[in-house]
Amino acid sequence: MSGYRGRFAPSPTGPLHIGSLVSALASYLDARAHRGAWIVRIEDVDGPRTVPDAARDILSGLARFGMHSDEPPVWQSQREAAYEHAFDRLQATGLIYPCGCTRREIADSLLNAHARHATLAYPGTCRDGLHGRAPRAWRLRVPDGEAAHARFVDRWQGAQAQDLATEVGDFVLKRADGVWAYQLAVVVDDAEARITHVVRGADLLDSTARQIYLQQCLGVPTPAYLHVPVVTNEEGEKLSKQTGATALDIDDPVATLAVAARHLGIEIRDAGSLDAFYAAATAEWAKRFGP
Ligand code: GLU
C-alpha cells in the first residue's frame, strides 16, 4: 500500500441513494487508483438528525456493492473527547468566542445588510462581547483583509477562491444545542485518521476553505481535495430522500454501479462481476486522476 489514505464519510440520515453511492464510488476508485487505504466514517455527530439503523443500512449497502472499509469504521458519536480537546486548544489561543445571537437575529441583520448590498456572512455581532446576552453557540474568528482570502486547487473543479471574511464570517464550531459543528468534527477526524485525500460531493466545496483554515489553526496537514458533481433531480436539487431519491437496486449491484460510474463520466458496459467492474472503473479513473 502507498501512503494514500482516503475516506467516505456518510451522515446516517437514510440508506445509500444514487448521490451517496456516487461519492462512495469516487472515493473508493481514487483510493484504489493510488493503491491506498479507504476508510468509512459514520458522521453521526449530529444526534438529532441521525436516523436509527441508517448507519447499519449504509454499511451493508456498501458491502453489497463490494466496498469494504480497510480499517474498522470510525463513528463520530464516539469521538466527543477529541472534539473537546481541539476546541480547548482553539480556546486557549483566543480564536473562539461565545455567540449570543439567535438564528432570527442573524437572519434579520443579514436581511438589513443585504438591503445595503453587503454579503451574507455572519456579521460578527458577538466578536467583542455578548452584550449582556447568554452564550449560545461558539464561533471561530476568521481573519480580516488579505489574510481572509482562501485559495486551493480542487482536483476535479480546479482553482477555488473564497473570502472567509466577507463570504463566510466567523463560523460555528459548537452549536447552541451543544452539538459539535460538522466543520470541527470533519477536520479533527480527517487529521486523526491521517487522511491524505478527500473525495466527496461538490455540495461541500463551499465548506473546504473553512476546513483548510481550521486545519491551519490546529496545525494539522491539509489533504488534497476532489469534489465530484452532485447528482440532482429534474428540478436541479441535490438528490436526497427529501428530493425524491429512490431506493437503489441492490439485486444487480454491477448494473447500479455502472449507473453511478456514468455520473462520474465513466462508461462501463456489461462488466459481469464486481471484480471486473472495479478493475475497469479503476483503470478509467486512474487515466484522469491517477498518481
Ligand atoms: N457527512 C457528509 C455528508 O454526508 C460528508 C462529509 C465529508 O465528506 O466531508 O454529506
Image (cartoon, grey):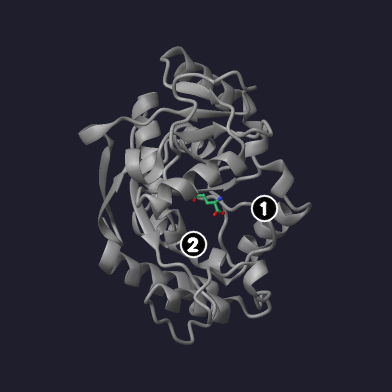
The image quadrant where one finds the C terminus is bottom left
Q: Is residue 73 positioned above or below 18 on the image? A: above
The answer to whether residue 3 is seen in the rendering is: no
The answer to whether residue 151 is seen in the rendering is: yes
The quarter of the picture where residue 202 lies is bottom left
Disc 2 under 8 Å from ligand 1? The reply is yes
Say which residue appears at 56% left-offset and 37% top-offset.
181
Say which residue appears at 57% left-offset and 78% top-offset.
256
- Secondary structure, mark 2, is helix
The one of 45 and 115 positioned closer to us in this rendering: 115
Say which residue appears at 45% left-offset and 39% top-offset.
122
The label shown at residue 134 is none
Say which residue appears at 58% left-offset and 33% top-offset.
101
Residue tagged by mark 2?
23
- The percent coordinates of residue 245 (x first, y second) are 63, 73
Residue tagged by mark 1?
12
- Secondary structure, mark 1, is loop
Q: Is residue 61 positioned above or below 160 on the image? A: below
Q: Is residue 209 left or right of residue 101?
A: left
* Circle 2 crowding by C-alpha within 10 Å: few under 14, some 14–19, many from 20: many
- The percent coordinates of residue 85 (x first, y second) are 54, 20
The one of 132 and 48 positioned closer to us in this rendering: 132
Q: Is residue 205 left or right of residue 80?
A: left
Amino acid type at circle 2 is: Ser
- The percent coordinates of residue 25 (x first, y second) are 48, 64
Q: How far apart are marks 2 and 1 (CA)?
A: 14 Å
Amino acid type at circle 1 is: Pro
- The percent coordinates of residue 20 (x first, y second) are 56, 63
Q: Which residue lies furthest to the right in this view?
A: 52
